[in-house]
Amino acid sequence: MALLDFLHKRNNNVEGEMSFIDHLEALRWHLIRSVIAIGIASIFFFVFVREIVELVVMAPTQDTFISYKWFCDLSHWLGMGDTICMQGVKATFQSTQMTGLFISSFTIAFVGGFIVAFPYIFWEFWRFVKPALSEKELKTTRGVIFWVSLLFFTGVLFGYYILTPFMVNFYFSYTLSANIEIKPTFSDYLENLVYTTMGIGVLFQMPLLIMILSQIGIVTAKFLRKYRRHAFVLILIAAAIITPSTDPVSLTIVAIPLYMLYEASIMVAARINKRQNAKKTEEWS
């Protein structure tokens, strides 16, 4: 029902009548242009994939990774000694498949291309959604492309510089027996790195998701405030999963920004609900 209402609003705000197929055709071209943008950006990453592997992908495993210095300086500044001081790991990755490294090259190129092209991808999505919005809604969503992109890039950087060092140190130090030697495949390491960075980048879109759910009436600020405690517990569980280290400091580092995003989501929902209530009051008067 919400989809039909959206298409009806979009149809009323575009020039001429558009059928359901016409809307799908418009969406198809937005998707095609987005895929082309990812492809163009991916070509650059594929050409320089060896340099990217050495300077970016493998960096969190090395002692020279800047985050290790940050954590150690923070630990000393907080008077905690070397509690959260970390260093790189002596890791030698292997590939158990003949095509493994070749496929990993495409994975790196695609992920890099998607990250770089993300603002354009969302811009294409926004061009499709924009005709369905009223003038007031357009004013309240001014600058949405900038803020969505900023949240995404912040999440990616947070995952890479903050969470990845914890992930690397935990998994390489975790052992069940002295007779077991950790020799992960490169594809396994790359998969975890992608989840940690891209996953957090998507997770940082929480305010945007709440904004959409509030617009269509599924979520309200009152509902989010009512279940604030439950959300806090879920955030702690998510932080514990993302950062499997038992150190409470690392858990806090992950939980704080996620909870701040939840509070920001409440503020976004409150503004939308206030505007919706004002609109209903005008219609009834």
Image (cartoon, rainbow, N blue to C red):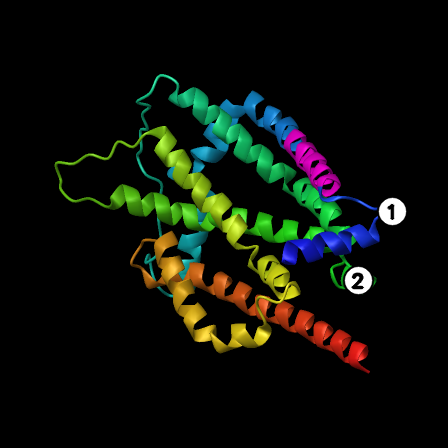
Q: Is residue 283 left or right of residue 29?
A: right
Left or right of residue 72: residue 155: right
Q: Element type at marker 1?
A: loop
Residue at 39%, 53% (x, y): give it: 242
Image position, residue 119 (x, y; %): 67, 43
Within 10 Å of disc 1 (Cα), the crowding (few <14, some 14-19, many 20+) is: few
SS at badge 2: helix
Majority secondary structure in the magenta region: helix
Q: Which mark is residue 15?
A: 1
Question: Residue at horizontal 59%, vertical 33%?
Answer: 113
Q: Amino acid at mark 1?
A: Glu
Quadrant location of the C terminus? bottom right
Is the residue 206 above or below the residue 69 in the image?
below
Magenta stretch: includes residue 63: no
Which region is colored magenta?
21-36
Viewer-closest of 123 and 217: 217
- Give the x, y percent position of residue 107: 48, 29
**Does the segment drawn in magenta span residue 29?**
yes
Query: Label 2 belongs to which residue?
Result: 139
Coordinates of residue 33 in the picture (x, y in percent): 70, 33
The answer to whether residue 250 is visible is no
Image location of residue 196, percent across then percent down:
44, 46
CA gap, disc 2 and disc 1: 21 Å
